Image (spheres, rainbow, N blue to C red):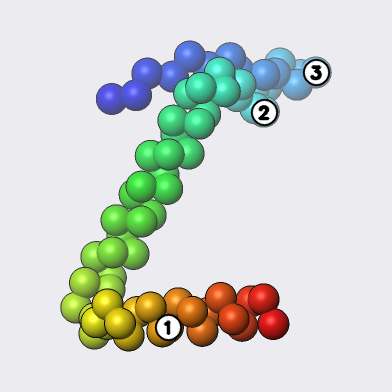
Amino acid sequence: MLELHKNIVLDEHQKPFAVQIPIEEFERLEEILENYGLSKIMDEVKDDERLSVEDAKVYYQSLKTNVEG
């Protein structure tokens, strides 16, 4: 499991209100969450219709044209 080196930030009443972690650990957490989200999306669409390579190229070209236009 990912080890976190956290510092708890206290308010003027000595109650915790935030946590600080090193940027490297934060970036690793982001990567883990993004990968988890991607795997969930992949699971959701695994039974969807698949495009042929040529159909996919046409589709992505149309997206590019719509964004640029």
Circle 1 SS class: helix
Q: Which of the marked residues, 1 or 3, is nearer the chain's N terminus? A: 3
Q: Which residue: 42% across, 83% down?
A: 59
Question: In this picture, is 38 found above or below 15?
Answer: below
Numbered label attached to residue 12: 3
Q: Which residue is mark 1?
A: 59
Distance, label 1 to label 3, CA atoms, is 56 Å
Q: 10 Å neighbourhood of mark 3: few (<14), some, or many (≥20)?
A: few
Question: In this picture, is 34 found above or below 45?
Answer: above
Residue 36 position within the rendered picture, expressed as x and y whole percent measured from the top left: 34, 49
Nearer to us of marks 1 and 3 is: 1
The amino acid marked with disc number 2 is: Phe
Total count of labels: 3
Residue 3 position within the rendered picture, expressed as x and y whole percent measured from the top left: 37, 18
Q: Which residue is mark 2?
A: 17
The amino acid marked with disc number 1 is: Tyr
Numbered label attached to residue 15: none
Distance, label 2 to label 3, CA atoms, is 10 Å
Question: In this picture, is 25 found above or below 7?
Answer: below
31 displayed left or right of 46? right
Residue extending furthest toward the left = 47
